[in-house]
Amino acid sequence: MKIALLGYGRMGKEIEKIALQRGHEIVIKSTGENSYDITKADVAIDFSIPSSAYDNISNCINNNVPVISGTTGWLDKYNDIVDLCNEKNGTFIYASNFSLGVNVFFELNKQLAKIMSTLEQYNVSIEEIHHIKKLDAPSGTAITLAEGVIENTNKKAWELDKKTSDENISIKAIRTPDVPGTHTVTYNSEVDTIDIKHTAHNRQGFALGAVIAAEWLNGKTGVFTMRDVLNLG
């Protein structure tokens, strides 16, 4: 495949390595400052910045180029992209995290939430740790984890850096050098604590999942998620 990399930072460079290893060609490397012809690409992978993501994705859809995005912080416009994709008969995947292991972790989180939903003595909270250059807080992965709990319990919303209440889930965001991403979901009671945790050792897992998703999109039309890619439905 001919791949456009929309965003050529650390993740873009890691995706490039994996894509080349898997026999693909990189035809566009956009830093956000250069112009490009998106129609040269068979598929686009967007790991840009929140202020650029919507324009990147809509440009792909308007030009009939399948696009996947791992950029977080722009999701207030997600439904607009879904509408555009359906209108243009386009192809799109968004994921807060493309790591195969994290997407298994998402499913484990949902199943645990179902089990814990009737045990009122436990308070649930989420902690995420990332490198200091990460622009958004909490991470998209932490938000996805919170949404998984909300779907399966009586919790109504999440709050950043606040104490968990009867209706809300506390998310704590920590920034420290050289941490690719660590996420922990904790159920705490007076007598014990249950934790589930995912620790990324490097960015290779995120990059591999993004390339696999791009490969999976070939020949498809519609709006998909990593659950579709991994057949977790």
Image: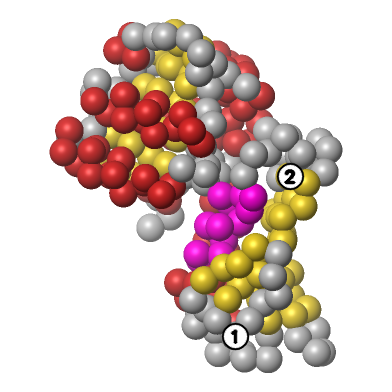
**Which residue does the image show at 61% across and 72% down from the upper left?**
169
Q: Residue at x 43, y 17 (%)?
A: 4
SS of the residue at dot 2?
strand
Say whether residue 103 is left or right of residue 123: left
Q: Quadrant of the N terminus?
A: top left
Q: Quadrant of residue 66?
A: top left
Place of residue 99 in the rendered image (x, y in percent of width and height, measured from the top left): 58, 42
Distance Cα–Cα, label 1 vs label 2:
27 Å
Rendered location of residue 231, percent (x, y):
40, 50
Q: Check disc 1 and give the amino acid type.
A: Asp
Q: Is residue 228 left or right of residue 169?
A: left
Chain part drawn in magenta: 137-148
209 or 147: nearer the viewer: 147
Say which quarter of the image contains residue 208: top right
Q: Main secondary structure of the magenta part?
A: helix
Are there few (<14), some (14-19), or many (20+) residues within 10 Å of tag 2? Answer: many
- In this view, the residue in front, 55 or 30, is 55
On the image, the x and y values in percent for residue 65 come to 29, 23
Q: Is 136 placed left or right of 64 in the picture?
A: right
* Residue 30 vertical placement versus 191 (above, below): above
**Disc 1 designates what residue?**
166
Q: Is residue 131 above or below residue 122?
A: above
Type of the residue with mark 2? His
Give coordinates of residue 31: x percent, y percent.
54, 16
Q: Is residue 80 magenta?
A: no
Front one among 70 and 172? 172
**Pointer 2: what residue?**
130
Q: Position of 167 compared to 65: left or right?
A: right
